[in-house]
Image (cartoon, rainbow, N blue to C red):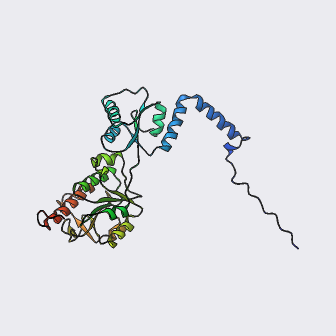
Amino acid sequence: MVPKRRSLRGKGPTPKSEDRTWHRAYREKVQREKRMAANPYLAAKRRGEERRKGAEEIIIGRNACLEALRTPMAVKRLFVARGIQKDERVEQICALAAKKGIPVEERDRGEIESMARNKAHQGVLLEAKSYEYKDLQEVLEACSSPLPLFVAADNLTDPQNLGAIIRSAAAFGADGVIIPHRRNAGVNAACWKASAGACAFVNVIRVENLNLALEKLKARGYAVVGLDGEGEKEVGKTGFELDPLVIVAGCEGKGISRLTRSKCDIEAKIAIEERMESLNVSVATAIALFATAEARRSSFPQGQSI
């Protein structure tokens, strides 16, 4: 009979050198922590790092904070550096925060610098709540419009352009703006400002995969029109205006990606002077939305609901 071999007992991963009490690295770590605890500036930096980890979104600088407070953006608290020289903007920021019932906290400069990741904070920070994106399926089920209209952004990198598109979507009665989760701007302070507050009431839908979302919409009877300077027809004259519609806007430089382009039923252009190569993506989207709204209005008798 062959005796059984003893199996090796694992002891788990090897601890880091600084976690071994007998190691030199551990003694150095203890000394380093003592120095940080004794230094008020380093202690404040450490507190700022901890607070930054738990924060959803940090808005940095006096102008950015002032503009954010002027929108319906959900803000949790205002941080002001201790001993800051208060100018007119800081007074306006504090007054708006007090009016909205937002807590104002004075913090050491080291903590403010750490929270701002050493960017030019000018002694003022806002901690804001992350935007709550809508779910595509829920929006589609709740949509009551007989001719739904959505805008989809493909690899749009500038949050100000996204905000302007959201503003145009609100102006022309679109049912929502669809953005991909990756490689696309999201709703932040710059986007809120550019949207002129429209982010508060427009359905901004974030999806994991834009192309799969477009396929889902097409399966539900939606037509997909991509904006392109070399398009086959002009916006508002594609023949799909009286269908449930998705208008796709591409990124600022390259336009619509190849795969997303393949999901479009047609590509539409905007007639502009030859000396101008293209339009800003948010301007082009606004024109396309206007042209679509006009085409739909002209197809129905006056006074009849679309």
Compared with 70, 234 (above or below) is below
Name the residue at 67% across, 42% down.
18
Residue 4 falls in image quadrant: bottom right
Is 28 situated left or right of 249 in this image?
A: right
Question: Relative to the observer, which residue lies in front, 22 or 8?
Answer: 8
Name the residue at 39% across, 52% down.
132
Residue 188 percent across, percent down from the top left: 36, 48
Question: Relative to the observer, which residue lies in front, 201 or 276?
Answer: 201
Name the residue at 33% across, 41% down.
68
Q: Is residue 120 visible?
A: no
Compared with 74, 140 (above or below) is below
Residue 25 percent across, percent down from the top left: 68, 40
Residue 208 percent across, percent down from the top left: 42, 62
Q: Is residue 269 visible?
A: yes
Q: Quadrant of the C terminus?
A: bottom left
Compared with 36, 166 (above or below) is below
Q: Quadrant of the N terminus?
A: bottom right
Is 272 situated left or right of 56 in this image?
A: left
Q: Residue furthest left?
A: 302
Question: Relative to the observer, which residue lies in front, 77 or 43?
Answer: 77
Residue 100 percent across, percent down from the top left: 34, 37
Residue 232 falls in image quadrant: bottom left
